[in-house]
Amino acid sequence: MKLAVIAGDGIGPEVIAQALKVLDVVVPGVDRTEYDLGAARYHRTGEILPESVLPELKLHDAILLGAIGDPSVPSGVLERGLLLKTRFALDHHVNLRPSKLHAGVTSPLSGNPDIDFVVVREGTEGPYTGTGGAIRVGTPHEVATEVSNNTRFGIERVVRYAFATAQARRKHLTLVHKNNVLAFAGSLWQRTVDEVAVEFPDVTTAYQHIDAATIHMVTDPGRFDVIVTDNLFGDIITDLAAAVSGGIGLAASGNIDASGVNPSMFEPVHGSAPDIAGQSKADPTAAILSVSLLLNHLGNTEGAVRIESAVAKDLASRAGAASTVEIGDRIAAIV
Ligand code: IPM
Ligand code: MN
């Protein structure tokens, strides 16, 4: 396996070190290339994603990313120039974000055994395309427009992935949107779900508005198996999903090119957390679980399950605060 590693900013390098420690136990001898990208590189050379990097990344089987973003760089510059640019350039149209409340984990919904769902977030469209603009900037009559792009092609491929994911699980797919207001896109999403549903007769479907879905994710999360939604709704609801399933320190994700043409990129949902960087306080579990998603994507289901089980075991027996390295060591020891 050829793995590209972008540890990035803040707590990124700390959590990635632990994720690689666990990977080394499960799959020894991975051929790794580390890419020095993020705030430090930007300050040193002015580069965010040098031209040569994308073609190089494409030569790998997968990418493991820590976190991007730093208070010393204006908000959004690195996120757009590195993270979003890579997702778009490598056609990561599926943003896969599973949520499971493990035994022993405290959450605002602790004791609720029913949190076990996957959000399939569209990754290359919606309002993330950068379409729009502003006129009369700085005047009292300034107008800012952000366009949400939704293509039949883009929706269909992510919806098909979501159906297949549901078919391998509890066979229930919920489309989350806001079709009472966003009627054009809402209609296209719904029609696409209805049409693809014919290929998956054993999967039941439901629809929820995004606002109602946030209520149900808190009051009745057991109703969700797989959720499919657009890029922005998916961004927001997966932070809520992380919060109810043990916090952002446990939430893993995959940015997937389901066509297999480009390498997929796996990363914790959390950001660079500059306030706790360098203190070995960050929970590396999300990064470690991202390695599990990575192995699963590459067909090493046995390795993926090993990591997930080791994490579940460790979570069930956690007592008191542990350092980043301690958690990594413990999981690496039992994996
Ligand atoms: C995420 C993040 C990114 C996103 C930001 C950093 C651009 O919030 O991965 O969820 O909005 O997709
Ligand atoms: Mn987000």
Image (cartoon, rainbow, N blue to C red):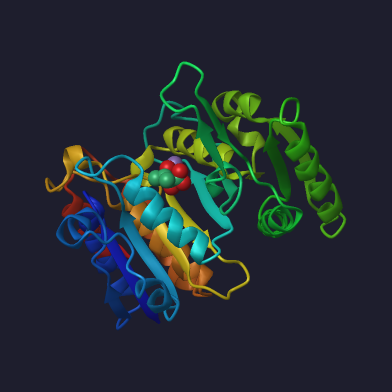
Q: Image quadrant of residue 110? A: top left
Picture quarter with ligand 2: top left
Q: Where residue 154 sits in the image (x, y, percent)?
A: 68, 56
Q: Where residue 186 sits in the image (x, y, percent)?
A: 75, 37
| Nearer the observer, 274 or 207 | 274
Please indicate, yes or no, whether residue 242 appears anywhere in the rendered image: yes
Q: Image quadrant of residue 248? A: top left
**Side of 37 relative to 297 (left or right):** left
**Side of 264 relative to 212 (left or right):** left
Q: Residue at x 17, y 40 (%)?
A: 276
Q: Where residue 328 sits in the image (x, y, percent)?
A: 23, 58
Q: Residue at x 52, y 69 (%)?
A: 297
**Side of 309 relative to 200 (left or right):** left
- Give the quarter of the figure containing the C terminus: bottom left
Q: Where residue 185 sits in the image (x, y, percent)?
A: 73, 39
| Nearer the observer, 48 or 28 | 48
- Give the quarter of the figure containing the N terminus: bottom left
Q: Residue at the far top: name it.
A: 140
Q: Residue at x 66, y 35 (%)?
A: 223
